[in-house]
Amino acid sequence: MIFAWHFVAVAAVCMLVVWPLARARWPWRAPGTGILLWQALGLGWGLSVIGTALAVGLEPYGLGLLPGLARLGGDLTSGKLPAQVDIGRLGAVAAGLGVAAGLLGALASCVVDVVAARRRHRMLLALVAHQDPSAPGALVLDHPVAAAYCLPGIRSQVVVSAGALRLLDRSQLAAVLSHEQAHAREHHDLVVLPFIALRRALPRVGLVGDAVTAVSLLVEMCADDRALREHAARPLVAALLRFGAEGPLAPPRGALGAGEEVASRVLRLTDPRRRLPGLAKMLVIAVAALLVATPMSLFALPA
Amino acid sequence: MARRTVNRLGELERAVMEVLWEREAPATARDVARTLIARDLAYTTVMTVLDRLTKKGFVHRERTGRAWSYTAAASREAYITRLMLDALDDTGDRDAALVRFARSISSPEAEVLRGALADAGDRGEEPESKPGQG
């Protein structure tokens, strides 16, 4: 039963940490490290929930999870189950495997949908977008509303609208393009995707929505930082504010409204004490490693 | 080599769509080839491109007499609008398909931010006002 309690403990820690972490400001000072912690929380939580059910179900074998699972498989095929492995134990194992299948299924369906949406988007871009010397490396859409985005993929494509070209001056546009190219280069879409999939699997769980919002924001901050390597903060901030002042679209959603999102990025870019100290970063990385390593080792270790 | 063929086809699809968008009336493959005469395309090439576009749903075709005539399924503007909606509508799982520069916020919020920035003594090339928005 020790195993099950370990898993329960990790799962509980993960859930207790999400709420304060979604509202914490220190990850803004080290967005890459913050993302790592979120990934560890997600993975650690998933493994622990699955592990709890499996540990309860496989306890009579006393073998640990993966060897126990293999033994159970063997016993089921040969039709000789030990007496202690009753219907309740089997139910627990089935629940654990069901959760695993559900999470992986949500991820797979999310990937399929995203790939289809991108494919359609790419086909339409090929028909109607054009290149423009004022936006090197990007495609331009003739539309008056300002938009700038990255269509991720094997060959990612940065797109800006004519509205954005009109809205931004040369240095601001360069900063925005650099921000979008950072998304493409660092495959930020792959960072966000698992969290979107988790939200699809658990649509009513507020904590998951908080995680999606927080990770999306951290990804933007990573791209901002990357753009700052080549551009001054000033044009990037100006571009953010100009975009922010645009349109009536997109009502606030989740823990962090759209207005707060832009505000947090602007304040961060104008704050000189931006970086988290190296020691603090290492501490966070250690916690993240622990959150993943604990359930993983419990899967592999014999009891 | 294969990629070059694909790119050329993509470019032709675009050219053919532009012909269909220009014309008010349905066009036959021969009409399209005639309009694209500068490209010196074989009639069969135009047929192939129209066929591909039909399969992708960008073009509708119907029989008139012995030839097929083709029309664009939607206007250029409609496609651009659809792309913009993809880009701007950040509800639900669409979040995952694209990565945007910034979500829109309301003007008052932006004004407050601008004010805060100006108060911080951060002057210079800050935009005085946003250009008119169509």
Image (cartoon, helix red, strand yellow):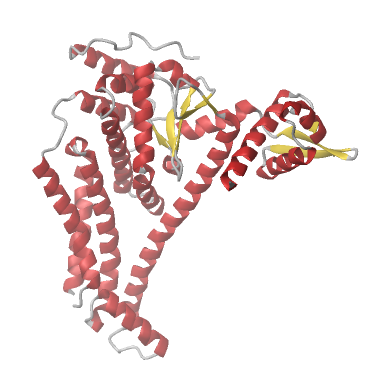
- Kindly give the residue lying farthest to the right in the view shown: B65
Residue drawn at point x = 45 percent, y = 51 percent: A110
Residue drawn at point x = 20 percent, y = 23 percent: A270
Q: Can residue A13 be seen by looking at this rendering?
A: no
Residue A191 point in image, percent of width and height = 34, 46
Give the camera-side residue of A52 and A108. A108
Location of the N terminus of chain A (image quadrant): bottom left
Location of the C terminus of chain A (image quadrant): bottom left
Give the camera-side residue of A182 and A72. A182
Count of numbered labels shown in the rendering: 0
Give the camera-side residue of A16 and A213. A213
Residue B109's place in the image compared with B81, above or below, is: above
Residue A136's place in the image compared with B70, above or below, is: above
Q: Is residue B88 left or right of residue B20?
A: left
Q: Quadrant of residue A152?
A: top left
- Kindly give the residue lying farthest to the left in the view shown: A279
Residue A5's place in the image compared with B101, above or below, is: below
- Kindly give the residue lying farthest to the front in the view shown: B1
Q: Is residue B21 left or right of residue A262?
A: right
Residue drawn at point x = 24 percent, y = 83 percent: A60
Q: Quadrant of residue A56?
A: bottom left
Residue B112 point in image, percent of width and height = 27, 16
Q: Can residue A293 be seen by looking at this rendering?
A: yes
Residue A144 point in image, percent of width and height = 51, 19
- Kindly give the residue lying farthest to the top in the view shown: B128
Residue B103 point in image, percent of width and height = 38, 29
